[in-house]
Amino acid sequence: MRMIIVLCVVLVLTVQARAGVPPYPMLALDSESAFPVVLFCVPDGSGDDLTEAQVYGAGVHLVVDATLTATLYDAFGTPVSFYPLEDIWLESVQDALVFCTMGTVADAPTDAQGRTTFSGPFLVGGGMDPTAGDKLELVVGGYTDPTARVDVYLLTPDLDGDRDVDLSDVVAFVDLYWNDPAYHIAVDYYHDGVLNLSDLVEFAGALNRTCP
């Protein structure tokens, strides 16, 4: 009888440990937009929401809702409910972004179907380059899944990635905007395929903005 009790205790502990396994590698990330999009982000969170994303490469300024939905499954294919939001975030595949605290976390914990959303705004610096094959990917508890990626590109006026839009960013912006004849998507904040006054206005409005 004593041996049976011990075996029962071991079985319970094993089940509890399995319930804590991170939901990797079964992750899904989907965008409401059928198009690749860019999003203007500022370290203090004053940038655009994903409901105001801009269609990438359209040649004109087009705004679409690109809200992201993430779905988490455990190793057995069961949706992971009520997973904490602070452990669900987005990153650049090429590590091109720097983050303020809670900069790209999910809107809420996962629901009963294992789903949550990302709507922004995101508190980040740096910037992604879609021409180099970068993408946004889902990270859950430090784990990623190569299939959980979307063509969403975050552009910021914090060009040097120090989490502060300051004089060094002004120098970088001027170099890309004025002095180089080539088009640079990194400063096409009002995304329409050309660098013009609208982009300058967006950059000027973000000056001296920093992580909270």
Image: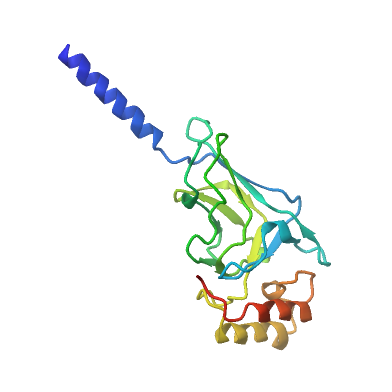
Residue 79: image x %, image y %? Answer: 53, 34
Q: Is residue 212 above or below residue 8?
A: below
Residue 147 vertical placement versus 75 (above, below) = below
| Whether residue 196 is visible | no
- Residue 12, by quadrant, is top left
The residue drawn where x is 45% and y is 48% is: 141
* Display coloring: rainbow
Position of 212 with respect to 188 (left or right) is left
The image quarter containing residue 21 is top left
Q: Quadrant of the N terminus?
A: top left
Where 198 falls versus 106 (above or below)?
below
Residue 24 appears at what percent x and percent y? 48, 41
Asked whether the viewer can see residue 150, the reply is: yes
Is 84 in front, or is 182? 84
Residue lying at the far right of the rendered structure? 60
Quadrant housing residue 129: bottom right
Q: Is residue 15 above or below residue 147?
A: above
Q: State the residue at coordinates (21%, 14%).
A: 4
Q: Position of residue 27 (x, y in %)?
A: 55, 42
Task: Name the spot of residue 23 as percent of width and height, x first.
Answer: 48, 40
Q: Residue sitting at 17 percent across and 16 percent down?
A: 3
Q: How many marks?
A: 0
Q: Residue furthest top?
A: 1
Q: Name the residue at the left extreme.
A: 2
Q: Nearer the viewer, residue 71 or 35?
A: 71
